[in-house]
C-alpha cells in the first residue's frame, strides 16, 4: 500500500471510529432518558429519528476524511473531539 493510500485508510478509520463512538453512546443514552445537548443534533433526532442521526454522522465521516486524508496527525486531531463527546456521553449515562 502506498503512503497516500495508507493515510487515506487511516483517516477513514479514525473518522469512522470517532463518529461510531459518538453515535453509539448518544443513542444508548437517549434510550435511557438522556437528552441531546446539541440543538442541531436534537433537531435531527426529533425530525429524522435515529436513522437520520446515523446518516448525518456518516456524512461527517466523509467530510472529515476529505479534510484530513493528507496527514495522519490532522486525522487524529479531527477525530479527537468526537471521542471526547463519546466520553462525555458515558459520563451522562453513568449519572442516569
Image: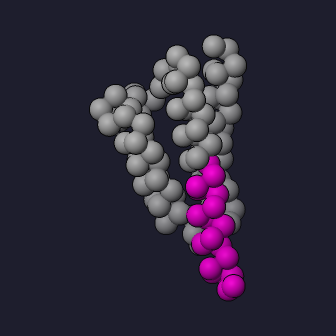
Give the number of callouts: 0
From this viewpoint, is residue 67 visible?
Answer: no
Point out residue 33 in the picture as x, y percentages from the top left corner. 52, 16
Is 96 contained in the magenta span?
no
Image: magenta residue range: 1-18
Residue 48 shows in this picture: yes
In which image quadrant can residue 11 be found?
A: bottom right
Give the quarter of the figure containing the C terminus.
top right
Q: Say above or below: 11 vs 94.
A: below
> Residue 64 location in percent, x, y?
51, 58
> What colour-coding does the image apply?
one colour
Residue drawn at point x = 52 percent, y = 24 percent? 31
Counting from the top left corner in percent of width and height, residue 85 is at 61, 35
Was residue 15 drawn as part of the magenta stretch in this picture? yes
Q: Quadrant of the N terminus?
A: bottom right
- State the image coordinates of residue 3 (x, y, percent, origin top left): 69, 82
In the rendered image, the vertical position of residue 44 relative to residue 68, given as above or below? above
Residue furthest to the left in view is: 47
Determine the residue positioned at 58% across, 55% down.
16
Along the line of sight, the residue nearer the viewer: 23 or 70: 23
Name, please, the residue furthest toward the bottom: 2
Q: Residue visible at 48% across and 20% down?
A: 35
Residue appearing at x 40%, y 28% in the figure: 42
Vertical placement of 84 versus 4: above or below? above
- Which residue is situated farthest in the top direction here? 96
The answer to whether residue 7 is above or below residue 84 is: below
Name the dominant secondary structure of the magenta segment. Answer: helix
Amino acid at each position: 500500500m502506498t503512503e497516500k493510500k495508507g493515510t487515506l485508510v487511516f483517516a477513514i478509520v479514525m473518522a469512522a471510529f470517532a463518529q461510531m463512538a459518538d453515535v453509539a453512546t448518544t443513542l444508548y443514552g437517549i434510550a435511557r432518558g438522556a437528552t441531546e445537548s446539541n440543538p442541531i443534533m436534537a433537531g435531527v433526532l426529533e425530525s429524522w429519528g435515529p436513522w437520520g442521526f446515523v446518516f448525518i454522522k456518516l456524512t461527517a465521516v466523509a467530510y472529515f476524511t476529505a479534510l484530513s486524508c493528507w496527514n495522519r496527525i490532522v486525522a487524529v486531531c479531527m477525530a479527537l473531539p468526537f471521542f471526547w463527546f463519546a466520553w462525555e456521553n458515558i459520563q451522562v449515562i453513568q449519572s442516569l
